[in-house]
Image: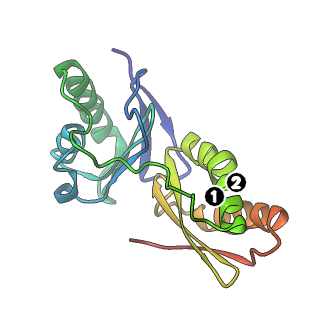
Amino acid sequence: MFIQTEMTPNPATLKFLPGREVMTEGTANFTRPEDAGHSPLALRLFGLDGVAGVFLGSDFVTVTKMPDREWDSLKPMILGSIMDHFTSGQPVVSGGGAVVAEDDSDDDEIVAQIKDLIETRVRPAVAQDGGDILFRGFEDGIVYLHMQGACSGCPSSTATLRHGIENMLRYYVPEVQEVRPVEY
């Protein structure tokens, strides 16, 4: 098994591409080991000293390191853990845990348009960088988005939100005045 790695805009995060499907549907974001109980892969990665976060995408695993650790020492251990997991035959996630597309049957026209733009134009771009972005609401002209994986805590995430996503949404949806990040 050959696992490729890619740098992300976030220096604390690396993207690992195992050359096979990771998540069959949705994504999974783990910011603490306690939250990773239903993911044998995430638990295995959190077992490594220095891993601060694990994000699982369709065909990639994004790992965030603790600030006091260096990639030179951590990367080989992560590669070994990912390889061991996939050769073990264990599932990546057992029982739920994936974030899947929301049911937008009750959305008004503006919210549906915002969600469609995020799904078709924004999410594929941030997935390339090892992250994900989720719609969390639209109220009084403000779009609330939650950033995950490499995008969470990335030094350029504010610029991405303001100059990229906000400008694009304002162009296509005049009712949008601002985009704000939210945590949950």
Q: Quadrant of the C terminus?
A: bottom left
Residue 159: image quadrant is bottom right
Number of residues whose C-alpha sits closer than 10 Å to that of mark 1, classed few (under 14), some (14–19) or many (20 or more): many
Residue occupying the far bottom of the picture = 140
Q: Residue tagged by mark 1?
A: 115
Identify the residue at image location x=43%, y=43%.
Answer: 26
Q: Are marks 2 and 1 in contact (CB under 8 Å)?
A: yes
Amino acid bearing label 1: Lys
Amino acid bearing label 2: Leu
Number of residues whose C-alpha sits closer than 10 Å to that of mark 2, classed few (under 14), some (14–19) or many (20 or more): some
Which is more toward the observer, 146 or 63? 146
Residue occupying the far top of the picture = 1
Q: Is residue 181 left or right of residue 149?
A: right
Q: Residue tagged by mark 2?
A: 117
Identify the residue at image location x=30%, y=29%.
Answer: 79
Q: Is residue 157 left or right of residue 22?
A: right
Q: Secondary structure at mark 2?
A: helix
**Where residue 7 sits in the image (x, y, percent)?**
51, 40
**Where residue 179 sits in the image (x, y, percent)?**
65, 73
**Where residue 11 sits in the image (x, y, percent)?**
48, 52
